[in-house]
Amino acid sequence: MKKFKSLSTLLLLFSMAVLCYAQAKTGNYSQKLGGNKISDYKDAYGFLSSEEDRNSKLYKKLKSDAIYSSYEEHYANLMPIPDLTEIDTREEMAYFVTYICNAHMEASLLTESHEDTKNARQIINDAMMENAKKAARGLPYDTQIHFDPNKDAYMALINRVKNPYNSLYAEGQDIVIYQDAKNDEELSWLVDMINGGINRIVYNQFYSIILPACRDWYNSEECRQVQEIEDELIARARAEKIRKTPEWFVEGRKKELEIVTEYNRKNLAKLMKIIEPKVNEKKALLSLFIKADTEVDDLRANGKFSMDYVNAKVTTYGAVEVAFTSYYMWMSYLGSLPLVRTPVVPKVGERFLFY
């Protein structure tokens, strides 16, 4: 039993499915398990808007379950990269991307409240304003208001995360949008992506993995094998004029299913080679940023709030949350691969239909 199989009957948006125009609109049974345009890869599963997703009981529970008491605890419970057998159908991939990834990403940003830091900044700003008014009027004022014995230590922590954080932020901003498309084929892919764009690192793999995955099914050996099995099943069904689904028909469809899922896993494995190193890279950055964020609070201990502390804290927790977002975004890029539709496997004895 697959991890997500109990939810595979949900009609979910395969939100990052992509397919550029590949073949004529006509095709045999096996070819149509793929598709010839983007909509073929998601329309069959209906459309669920992000607002509907986020208001569903399922989504709210998934997000609630992923909210931990600290960054360290969330890190210890990071959602792992799924096994290919858990995401090798469109329904499972849609559930994984639309629900699992998004829920964990939102939960990571709710892990710690920053009200204390925000309040401290306001208190310090008010004190500095009052100090300036006193100085302007020639009244005694606090000459130590800017002094913090940990100033250099805070700055060292800021410098520790500065460069990796800037690189991470820049990567997240380097998005290819539909205006950058080189041709109509590429445009049809980019337009269908969420927010009309995709990370440039993923985009650079477009021609090498994603587009071939759209085109190759039509002429693949696997496609031929599935059609051969289906032709034999239908011919026998017609010859025997069956009205109830027999066991041999179910077994034939199961063979088709095995071929299709193996084909999907083969292509997912290619994309995983790109995704997995990036996800592990983000995990390493998370460890670095969370450690720095913890050290900021350790330095202050129960001491006063200072602007040096506030600046360091905003920098470190900002880096942590950007890294969490990047981690789950790279995980969700697995959904950028179009998957061949899995054959319908009827139950033995039910009314027979020529699907």
Image (cartoon, grey):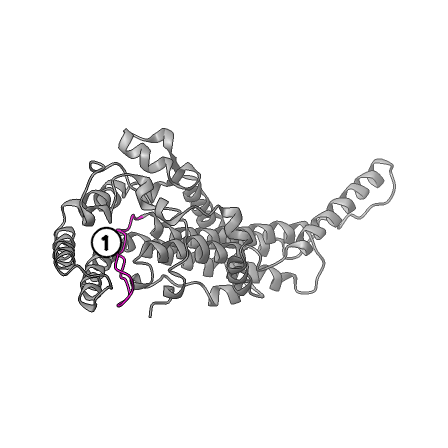
Query: What residue sits 47% from the left and 67% below the top?
Result: 77
Q: To which quarter of the image does residue 182 belong?
A: top left
Left or right: residue 308 versus residue 77 is right
Q: To which quarter of the image does residue 26 belong?
A: top left
Left or right: residue 194 versus residue 220 is right
The foreground one among 42 and 29 is 29
Residue 218 versus residue 228 in the image, above or below: above
The residue singled out by tag 1 in the image is: 354
Residue 208: in magenta span: no
The foreground one among 86 and 327 is 86
Image position, residue 253 (x, y; %): 21, 61
The foreground one among 344 and 322 is 344
Image position, residue 224 (x, y; %): 12, 51
Q: What residue type is disc 1 on?
A: Phe
Residue 351: in magenta span: yes
The span picked out in magenta is: 337-355
Residue 156 in view in this figure: no
